[in-house]
Amino acid sequence: MEKLAQILFLLGLAAWLGWVIARRYLDSDFKDKEMRDLPTDQQVQRHIKYMRQDLSMLAVTNFAILLVLVYALILKL
């Protein structure tokens, strides 16, 4: 049963990775070549601020998930 759980986890991880890669390369937003007006400096600064906050939250969340996975897979919960 334990091996089945690990296999299902790895299959789920592979499916998620495939979904992310497919979404990245098949998404029309990345292929959009249409020229648009440049954003103002205030808009750029606001976007940078929010991106920093998002990346910080992602880093904390990913580290927490890594700790759970290490505990579950290495230490055999």
Image (tube, rainbow, N blue to C red):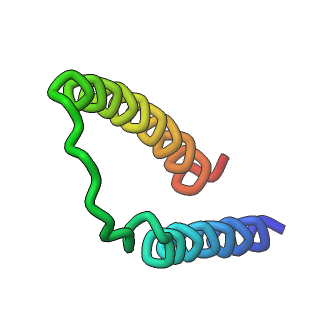
* Residue 43 found in image quarter: top left
* Residue 51 found in image quarter: top left
Name the outermost residue toward the left: 41
Residue drawn at x 47%, y 45% as measured from the top left: 66
Using the image as rendered, state which of residue 38 and residue 64 is in the foreground: 38
Label count reads 0
* Residue 4 found in image quarter: bottom right
Give the vertical position of 75 relative to 53 (above or below): below
- Horizontal side of 22 relative to 50 (left or right) equals right
Give the vertical position of 15 relative to 49 (above or below): below
Check the picture and name the quadrant holding the N terminus: bottom right
Using the image as rendered, state which of residue 54 and residue 71 is in the foreground: 54
Give the vertical position of 41 relative to 74 (above or below): above
Residue drawn at x 19%, y 30% as measured from the top left: 40
- Residue 49 position, x and y percent, is 27, 24
- Residue 50 position, x and y percent, is 34, 27
Residue drawn at x 63%, y 52% as measured from the top left: 76
Residue drawn at x 56%, y 76% as measured from the top left: 18
Give the vertical position of 77 relative to 60 (above or below): below
Using the image as rendered, state which of residue 53 and residue 7 is in the foreground: 53
- Horizontal side of 18 relative to 36 (left or right) equals right
- Residue 29 position, x and y percent, is 44, 64
